[in-house]
Image (cartoon, coloured by chain):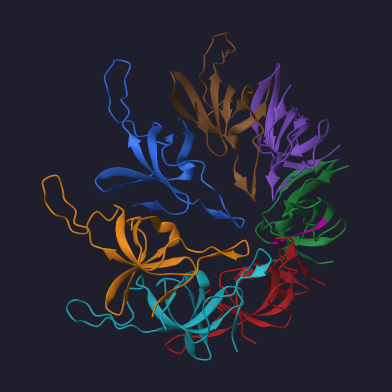
Chain colours: A red, B cyan, C orange, D blue, E green, F brown, G purple
Amino acid sequence: MIRPVGDRVIIEPIEQEEQTPGGIVLPGTAKEKPQEGKVIAAGPGLFRDGQRMEPEVKAGDIILFSGHAGTEIKHEGRALLVLQESDVLAVIS
Amino acid sequence: MIRPVGDRVIIEPIEQEEQTPGGIVLPGTAKEKPQEGKVIAAGPGLFRDGQRMEPEVKAGDIILFSGHAGTEIKHEGRALLVLQESDVLAVIS
Amino acid sequence: MIRPVGDRVIIEPIEQEEQTPGGIVLPGTAKEKPQEGKVIAAGPGLFRDGQRMEPEVKAGDIILFSGHAGTEIKHEGRALLVLQESDVLAVIS
Amino acid sequence: MIRPVGDRVIIEPIEQEEQTPGGIVLPGTAKEKPQEGKVIAAGPGLFRDGQRMEPEVKAGDIILFSGHAGTEIKHEGRALLVLQESDVLAVIS
Amino acid sequence: MIRPVGDRVIIEPIEQEEQTPGGIVLPGTAKEKPQEGKVIAAGPGLFRDGQRMEPEVKAGDIILFSGHAGTEIKHEGRALLVLQESDVLAVIS
Amino acid sequence: MIRPVGDRVIIEPIEQEEQTPGGIVLPGTAKEKPQEGKVIAAGPGLFRDGQRMEPEVKAGDIILFSGHAGTEIKHEGRALLVLQESDVLAVIS
Amino acid sequence: MIRPVGDRVIIEPIEQEEQTPGGIVLPGTAKEKPQEGKVIAAGPGLFRDGQRMEPEVKAGDIILFSGHAGTEIKHEGRALLVLQESDVLAVIS
């Protein structure tokens, strides 16, 4: 069980094969590039102006997030990332 | 499908031909200059003072935005930019 | 058509002839000096505390603004400036 | 006509003769010292929490303000200063 | 008795055995890595917009927190850490 | 007449004799040390959340304030200091 | 009489004997370490969102506070510290 707090979102990064012009595959480099990941769990959202701001992402969404964001954690043998919702750029499916 | 989160706006930059005094065409350089682009999708807007602040731009608008803003992404083969609404200067059509 | 977003104000700078003590005319230099310009269009204003804050300037006003402010744009052949309302010092006619 | 915007206050600085211990008069130097000036016009005040915050100074007041504050402007031949209300220390008459 | 104030959370860090690829155990190093700890006590939460924001963690929770966060204290012979709630990443049991 | 604006507080510093271990009197040095002063006048307080925040000090109070704070002014021959209310530490009589 | 203003809290630090592994007593050193102190007086609390935020500590409480915080003052022969409530970590009795 892992329950993010506040506006935290826990994701599992999706390894992206990066192809250079010369065709060489660079798995998971270029950390600055936006990354893709699957949402494992989202927190309840921040408390502001007397209300919880419901997160716009939920478990199962595939998202784009700023490449350098997040804190790496290991949980039950899986390499996960803890983001803040503001690191999420868009939901892509 | 790509759904921006919060106040994110996804656009497709419009290449601008830049003509120097000497008549030389500089396609897409001078990154600092405001750029033009077409809005692909706009997020729901930020949540503040208990309300969603509806974005002022919508899909299809042609906009001017601060040249150096945004995160480059590739989605379904297209080179797109993820802006924040505050990067948008004006709607020009 | 050009429609500024949020608290943006689009103006057309008015070239000021600057006379040095020796009587030499310095057209449009000394960028730090407050500048004059004519308002082309004003945005709807920022959204705060649940309300739009109506801008205090409107199309046609002649204004004084902080000399170094704004983003230069070219629109329909005219050299314009995109300011934020907080760059405007006063309305002078 | 000159109408300041927001919390701007337009004043006409009052030249202060500064006497050093040796009795030497230093007209209008030591920019850091608080200055005196006459209020020419005050803006409507900032918009916050849904209300205009009426300015505490009005045309005709003689005020003390932080010496290095403000933007110098020339209007109808007069050398004026554009302050923000937060630059005003006190009203002295 | 120890009662945290505001959004403070007092925890007892759980020593993590860190295994390098070569199998060498590095107890409690790599301070940057997220740490695990047991919540001893949580404060009443911050006061904002006229309300107390109830903390999302309570005594007994096992949490993940940012590795470098917190102030070390000794209380009744135990080495504890005083965090702010924003340092907590997730509850893991 | 001198009327402070907003959260300004005008005081007359009270010279403190400072005794070093060797008994040497250091009048009014060590600017970093908290100073004592008498309140001459307090402004109406800042305007926030739609209300004036009444100042907690009034004319005649003897206060302790952060030693390096304030702007020196001369008014009607007296050396005064213009503080912000947040510079005041405590009222001591 | 000493009455702290706003969110100020006046305390009397409690000298802590610090024992190194070798058993050497280091009275009152290692300023970075959290300190203990007795609350002499607490201010009325800050004014926010139209309400006073009652302080969570009161005269007589023994507290833990961030070691390097506060302004030293001498009052009626006692060496005291003026903290802000946010410097207080916890109440320990």
Of the 4 image quadrants, the one containing the N terminus of chain A is: bottom right
- Front residue of E74/C62: it is C62
In the rendered image, residue C69, in percent from the top left (x then y), is placed at 36, 59
Instruction: Give the residues in magenta.
Output: E34-38
Q: Say above or below: A48 vs D90.
A: below
Is-magenta flag for residue E35? yes
Q: Position of residue D57 (x, y in %)?
A: 48, 41
**Residue beneath the point at 57% across and 35% down:** F43
Q: Nearer the viewer, residue E41 or B49?
A: B49
Question: In the visual, does D48 lie left or right of G26?
Answer: left
- Seen at 38% across and 35% down, the residue is D37
Q: Kindly indicate the quadrant of the structure image that contains residue G33.
A: top right
Q: Residue at x 66, y 58 (%)?
A: E30
Residue F36 in view: no
Number of numbered tags placed on the structure image? 0
Q: Is residue D29 magenta?
A: no
D57 relative to B6 in the view: left or right: left
Residue D21, given in percent of the width and then of the height, sits at 33, 16
**Toward which corner of the image does residue F75 lie, by quadrant?**
top left
Quadrant (top left/top right/bottom left/bottom right) for the C terminus of chain A: bottom right
Q: In this image, A52 relative to F80: left or right?
A: right
Estimate the x, y position of residue A19 in percent, counting from the top left. Answer: 49, 87
